[in-house]
Image (tube, coloured by chain):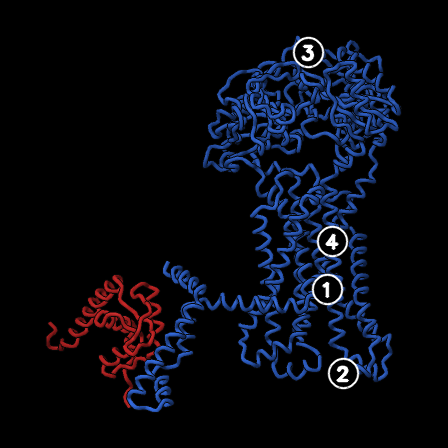
Amino acid sequence: MKEKPDVMQGTLTLMVLKTLDALGPQHGWGIARRIEQISGDLLAVNQGTLYPLLLKLEHEGSIASGFGASQNNRRARFYRLTAAGRKQLQAETRDWEQTAAIIARFFQVKAEDLP
Amino acid sequence: MKFLRRFFARLSNFAAGRRADQRLQEEIAEHLAFQTDENLRRGMSPAEARRQAVLKLGAAAAIREDHHAEHSLPFIENLLFDLKYAVRMLLRSPGFAFIAIATMALGVGATTAIYSVIDATLLHPLPYPNPSELVRIQDDLPGVGAQDVSVSIPEWKDLENSGIFQYVALDYFASMNLTGSAQPTRIAYKGVTPNYFAMLGVGAQLGRTFDPGDNTPGVIPEVVLSDGLWKSAFGADPRILEKTVRLDHDVYQVVGVMPPGFRDQGETSEERNMELWVAGGFADPPFPPPLRNLRFGTAFARLKPGLSVASAQAHIDALVASLKKQYPADYPAQAAWTIRLIPLAETVVGNLRQSLILLFGAVGLVLLISCVNVANLLLARASARGREIAVRQALGAARMRLIRQLLTESLLLFLLGGITGCAVLFCGRKFLLQFIPESLPRLNDISISWAVLAFAIVVSVAAGTIFGLAPAWLTSGLNLTETLRQEGRGSSGSRQRSRLRRALVIGELALSLVLMIAAGLLLRSFSDLFKVPLGFNPSRVMAIETWLPFPNDPKANIYSTPTQEAVMLREVLRRNRTLPGVEETAVGDLAALPLGHVKDDLNMFPLIREGQDVQSSQPPLIDTSTVSPEYFHLLGMTLLRGRLFVDQDLEATPSIAVINQAAARTYWPNQDPVGKRVRLSASKPDWTTIVGVIADARTESLADAAIPQVYLDLYQRLSNDLAFFLRGPVDPATIAAQVRTQIQAVDPELPIFRAETLNDVLSSSLSVRRFCMEMVALFAATALLLAGLGIYGTISYLVNEQSREIAIRLALGAQRSDILRMVLRQGLGLAAAGAVLGVAGALIVSHLMAGLLFGVSPYDLSTFVGVTAVLTAVAIAASYVPALRAMRLDPGTTLHSE
């Protein structure tokens, strides 16, 4: 069986921030499920690793948390993006696109294209 | 920076750690609940739903662990854990903890006490800004064997103009009588140049100091008071600056009061406790005429900023060379005049430096021995805890982890010891300070400051690390199976451990032998000093000092001729003779007070011998005292040739002198000095005839018998600083008041001060030596005690270890006396090894301290042999108890219990 690729260092942060940006306040399980859905089960996110990251992001001030009720009326901790988090998301998105573009160019260039 | 930020983040996490962990736990539980619900909805059975949810989440405990490790400080957590464990272990064996802590408290406390003295004296001797710029300027005439001969006024001007100093100041100290209140009071004052305080860099708390630009050639009619005098004599009068004071019949304006903490510089406690300062130009009367060969004051200077003492010295050497060329008559080649710049800090401590370093060395050895003792205790405990350690190792504890934990325990012990030592020192500081001789410089500044506390903590931690490491290393490095198999039966620990214990005891014995030999040598020197024939008889002699005023205005001086002074003195002596108990009386100047005067009280005069010392040569300087005729008889000094002074020698009769044998031997070798004529001043033409020679007496220094002396007749020569001598069974408590009444009946403006018996004077002249000797002896006794305990512990341990062997020997028919001898032999072996090492160390140390010894060779055989014998005796005594125990061992029980 082929191994599912690990989440690249730092990309999980971007995924979490983007999820909160897209869906608005979410609880931890919701974020985990969303990441799973979008990646189409291709990515092996060990769901447990999400929580230390959420703690860290909250400690750094990118996200904030508070209690709320879920759809099935379970009391849960909800996370939302802060202004700082939004800024961080923009910056990281830019960085990511830049990195992706550079890598993409490397794949396009063939040997004969070189002067 | 990033590292620091992370560290602080972790530190705050460390505090909040429990909360974060709890939160993670809650969130994971919540997540599992969501996922289980979801799985249930998908139609799984409840058990399967839960199982799948957990699988999907991953290892929750590992996640929490990782998070914890990443966001907290495992080092500090472990430390706290180790500390808790260490405290528990110590509480479990309170006897061991008490002995170890007390031993370290002794070592660290004693070391800290001596360090506090060193900190105040050697390390921070000068309480002035930029103290490294301050130097003392010392003139020497090595060609005629004279040192520190003062500076003449033209030389002072030359130094001021040399361009390398900010200020060059002169000072001398003397007495004045403060009159105007109920009792005339003698004031110790310093006469200085107006730039003196500017040179020190210290200002007044009230008013001002002298104006450094003041060019008055004579005395400036202004005084600066010390805080102490302002409070004691003027009741801290806030309007003191509007007042004038009357000193030696002259009137001075008070211009300033120095701050309470100000202490003057100087070598003696009297100089440092100055009460008053007067300034002047040192050029016009009452000062002597400014002649190049008339040396007058002690010079101090502040170097230009950035100039080192060495490069300043080079400038001075060049200046001296050019002055010698310019004034060949004043600086004859054979005198070899030189000027030396000495950092002022060095002169404050002076010859005490060696004693203080010796003390510090001695106390350092005590510290070392207490550390060794505690290390030994730790090793002994290690063998008792071998099983515990082995079990922990078997359960998977890493060696480093074990070492860290054992080290935490020893560090805790050493630190607790250090803290206890400091606490005891702090509580007992008032009591302990009494033992420090008053002549120690900066006595009042000795305190337990932060620097001293930091020293104690650093010493404790360093000692704990060094002496805790070896036991921890050896304890943790057990052979598992062997230990677990053996320890259950209470038998031997590792061979390495017992070898280390033996080495430690040998070291301890060697160190204490070094200390004991040092103490023995000092003790011998001290008792020799006391037994030395003095050449005079100090018993039942009282000395009471007075000061005759010496006003600046010659017309106000009622004692301006020797005859005027003699009339008063004879009357006081006659009255003193009538006091109860007084058998004999005499009077002399301060230089005549045996062993009781400081260097500035000495009168060093040039000795110009008729026909020998021609004008151009530099005459030798000689120590001169001025005494009344009864002085020699009162002090029991023997006349060898010629005659002594008699009542018929007066101002009008030819001037006469008596010299001691050392002077006769030095200056008139193989001749009869009686009848020879000398001049004792370069500027006055009159000759003085030597009429007698007396035997040498140790009046200058107990350690030196043969210092040339000249005695002049007080009735032929003026002297202002006087001491009355009374011999007889007088009551020391009341005699001072009685003498005061008699003196003031003759002149009501004369004060008396410092009434002391000559025996007290003599013993206080030895105070620093005695202090040093007593401290080293105390340290040596402590060291011996600790070494005795050490050898006792080790032999007991060895006996314990060998109990099985001993039992078997006994069972096989060994004699009990053989067993006793066997154990004692082990103790003796340790003592012998310690003695060999100790004697070698002591030879080095005694060689270094030769300068502190008197009358005893640094390699004194009897001291070395005696002290080694004492140490051996103690070692045997300490081994005897365990040896007895071994001898009385019951083979049956011992072998059964195994």
Tell me, for residue B790, which label it has, or none.
Answer: 1
- The residue identified by callout 4 is B780
Mark-to-mark CA distance, 1 and 2: 28 Å
Kindly check if marks 3 and 2 are in contact, taking CB atoms under 8 A apart as contact: no
Dot 1 amino acid type: Gly
What residue is rendered at 55% in x and 75% in y? B399
Mark-to-mark CA distance, 3 and 2: 99 Å
Instruction: Say yes or no: labels 3 and 4 on the same chain.
Output: yes
Could you tell me which secondary element the residue under label 1 belongs to? helix
Placement of B516 over or under B162, stated as above or below:
below
- The residue identified by callout 2 is B897
For the question of whether residue A77 can be seen, the reply is: yes
Chain letter for the blue colouring in the rendering: B
From the viewer's side, name the closer residue of B170 and B639: B170
**Marks 1, 2: nearer the viewer:** 2
Task: Identify the subunit bearing mark 1.
Answer: B
